[in-house]
């Protein structure tokens, strides 16, 4: 939850780590492990994460931390003796207390199991028992593609087991070994020397920081993200369902966005869009009511009705009669919050909004999945949603809810307008009840999100990220032999994209000890002399190093503007330098006009349209915080490409 991670690979594996921790909740609660051994190099990040989680749990219970050590595993038979010796050496250096318990071997994935067998041989030689924690337990090829659909493990079962054509080595997998798996593709961290500082060819137990300052920064940022991820995962061992952690993280973000409306006492009722919207509606409704009770306010009703298509509208209206009495007790001056799982056409939610409007209520929408400001503007312009509507998004994965009977506890039939608790299917009902117990357990955290909302990224700026990465790649290709000497933002709409581009470029410049890239903001009506001054400034910066240089022109409107034409003419006259155009047009990014507004950009044009003036708005700080957080992650994404 919150601002983006600097290293996307760490963020990508969090759901798998959360599921892995859920599978291990019994041994973690019993503090079974006295030492953790990570299977280098790919298993280092999961081992560090689990080590921080386990040691946090032990610290809360007044126990000393467990040591985390690393050994490079190998599936080659000729390395068996070397690996076993390395393991024994790590264990011999530990205190007697650390050698008295079980060992947890952590790896990123299991394919044949031979590498773990060799590490296990060294552990059993010391008379110790071990368990295995794997982020991924499915076989995959070197390029990260899965080898079919066959899974080679049985979570929590004893080993060795006959796994068909890929048997584990029985000499290295004693029957006391337990196997836990997050069932998550680990390709994002597999053989990532740039994240760990470890070479798979010249292995060293301690990471060796490379000379390249950008790679050194990647390794440091990875460690910072691992620490942050461990904090985000602290709830995972306490949850009853492996589905709950990702659901809870999304709901915390959604509730943080709802905080101003809840604290302002603007919401009078919550209506959940059954069936996929039942879980988020229950969480939002109970969190708001817990907040209101805590502050001496009466509870608000939490109601449910299924959003539907036009052909089922009569049945929906009849169902609405059941909730009308409760809705009639709500103050008409308050707003009704419609909670759903996702937004596609918006018409399903519209059917509920229309019913509430017929009762005299103004509606807002809270969505579990992504709903960008551009999507909201489109739905309002096409009159699907009213222009008075405010929308809030958790930016979660809607597949966690859509048709997920194990989460909602309701069966969904598209042909019939009905929802029924699946008590006749015990496994699904049990899972749904576990999810509900989890959100009840997390209720204090939900209330805290309403009282003290986290710093969240600006949704419109986040929509720029894919295009920004694409444009940065183009700039990097053109500027390989000609460093960027300056940036011109060609219009008000280009201001935010230009700041984002500059932030990423300046992160690299700072790490390499190079001068920062200057930026000039010019309105569309800028005179040729104003453009000439900006180009000359870049030329002076570029030629100071006696090398070719690149000028970047960023626009949020269209490729050809008077400013661009004047810049091209000036560059042609200088007969030196490259001009790269980075266009963020409204056709490809609907949120661009929104970012051009003064409340987000922090600037406005004078009456003549010639000069920009400061115009701080309520969203300026959020926009600038998001740009600052994205700069480093964009730099890393560019390096990955």
Image (tube, grey):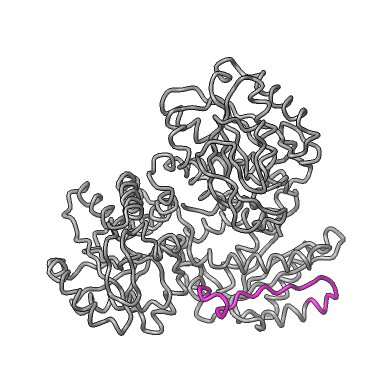
Q: Which residues are magenta?
A: 571-592
Nearest the viewer among 178 and 551 is 178
Residue ID at (50%, 36%): 53
- Residue 532 in view (yes/no): yes
- Residue 551 belongs to magenta span: no
Nearest the viewer among 72 and 178 is 178
Residue ID at (53%, 22%): 101
Question: Residue 435 location, x and y as percent?
Answer: 35, 51
Quadrant of residue 610 in the image? Answer: bottom right
- Residue 573 belongs to magenta span: yes
Question: Residue 464 location, x and y as percent?
Answer: 57, 67
Q: Is residue 197 left or right of residue 11?
A: right
Quadrant of residue 270 in the image? Answer: bottom left
Q: Is residue 266 left or right of residue 69?
A: left
Question: Residue 92 location, x and y as percent?
Answer: 67, 18
Q: Is residue 350 left or right of residue 528?
A: left
Q: Quadrant of the C terminus?
A: bottom right
Quadrant of residue 195 in the image? Answer: top right
């Amino acid at each position: 939850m919150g601002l983006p991670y600097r290293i996307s690979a760490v963020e990508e594996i969090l759901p798998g780590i959360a599921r892995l921790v859920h599978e291990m909740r019994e041994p973690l609660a019993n503090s079974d492990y006295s030492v953790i051994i990570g299977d280098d190099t790919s298993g280092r990040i999961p081992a560090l994460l689990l080590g921080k989680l386990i040691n946090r749990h032990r610290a809360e219970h007044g126990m000393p931390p467990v040591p985390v050590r690393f050994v490079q595993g190998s599936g080659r038979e000729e390395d068996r003796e070397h690996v076993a010796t390395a393991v024994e050496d790590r264990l011999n250096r530990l205190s007697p207390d650390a050698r008295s318990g079980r060992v947890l071997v952590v790896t990123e994935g299991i394919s044949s199991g031979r590498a773990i067998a060799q590490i296990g041989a060294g552990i059993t030689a010391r008379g110790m028992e071990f368990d295995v924690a794997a982020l991924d337990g499915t076989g995959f090829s070197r390029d990260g593609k899965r080898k079919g659909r066959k899974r080679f493990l049985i979570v929590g079962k004893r080993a060795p087991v006959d796994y068909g054509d890929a048997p584990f080595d029985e000499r290295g997998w004693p029957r006391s070994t337990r196997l836990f798996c997050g069932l998550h593709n680990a390709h994002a961290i597999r053989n990532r020397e740039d994240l760990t500082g470890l070479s798979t060819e010249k292995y060293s137990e301690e990471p060796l920081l490379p000379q390249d300052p950008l790679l050194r920064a990647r390794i440091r940022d990875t460690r910072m993200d691992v620490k942050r991820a461990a904090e985000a995962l602290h709830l995972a061992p306490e949850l009853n369902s492996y589905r709950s952690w990702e659901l809870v993280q999304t709901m915390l973000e959604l509730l943080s966005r709802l905080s101003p409306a809840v604290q302002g006492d603007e919401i009078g009722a919550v209506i959940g869009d059954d069936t996929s919207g039942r879980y988020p509606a229950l969480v939002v409704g109970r969190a708001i009511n817990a907040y209101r009770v805590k502050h001496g306010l009466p509870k608000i009703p939490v109601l449910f009705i299924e959003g539907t298509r036009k052909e089922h509208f009569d049945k929906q209206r009849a169902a609405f009669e059941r909730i009308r009495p409760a809705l009639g007790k709500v103050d008409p001056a308050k707003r009704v919050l419609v909670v759903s799982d996702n937004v596609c056409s918006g018409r399903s939610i519209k059917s509920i909004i229309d019913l509430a409007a017929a009762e005299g209520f103004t509606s807002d929408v809270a969505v579990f999945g992504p709903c960008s400001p551009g999507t909201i503007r489109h739905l309002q312009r096409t009159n699907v949603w009213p222009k008075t509507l405010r929308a809030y998004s958790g930016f979660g994965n809607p597949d966690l809810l859509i048709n997920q009977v194990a989460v909602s506890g309701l069966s969904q039939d598209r042909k019939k307008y009905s929802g029924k608790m699946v008590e006749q299917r015990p496994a699904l009902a049990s899972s749904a009840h576990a999810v509900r117990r989890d959100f009840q357990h997390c209720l204090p955290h939900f209330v805290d999100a309403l009282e003290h909302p986290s710093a969240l990224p600006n949704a419109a700026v986040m929509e720029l990220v894919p295009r920004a990465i694409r444009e940065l790649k183009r700039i990097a290709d053109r500027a390989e032999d000609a460093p960027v000497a300056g940036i011109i933002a060609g219009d008000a709409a280009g201001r935010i994209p230009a700041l984002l581009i500059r932030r990423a470029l300046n992160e690299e410049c700072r790490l390499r000890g190079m001068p920062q890239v200057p930026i000039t903001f010019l309105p569309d009506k800028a005179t040729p002399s104003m453009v000439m001054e900006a180009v000359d400034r870049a030329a002076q910066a570029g030629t100071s190093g006696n090398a070719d240089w690149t000028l970047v022109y960023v626009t949020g409107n269209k490729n050809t503007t008077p400013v661009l034409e004047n810049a091209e003419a000036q560059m042609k006259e200088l007969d030196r330098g490259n001009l790269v155009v980075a266009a963020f047009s409204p056709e490809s990014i609907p949120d661009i006009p929104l970012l051009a507004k003064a409340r987000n950009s922090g600037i406005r044009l004078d009456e003549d349209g010639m000069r920009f003036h400061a115009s701080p708005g309520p969203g300026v700080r959020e926009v600038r915080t998001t740009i600052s957080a994205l700069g480093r992650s964009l730099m890393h994404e560019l390096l990955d490409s």
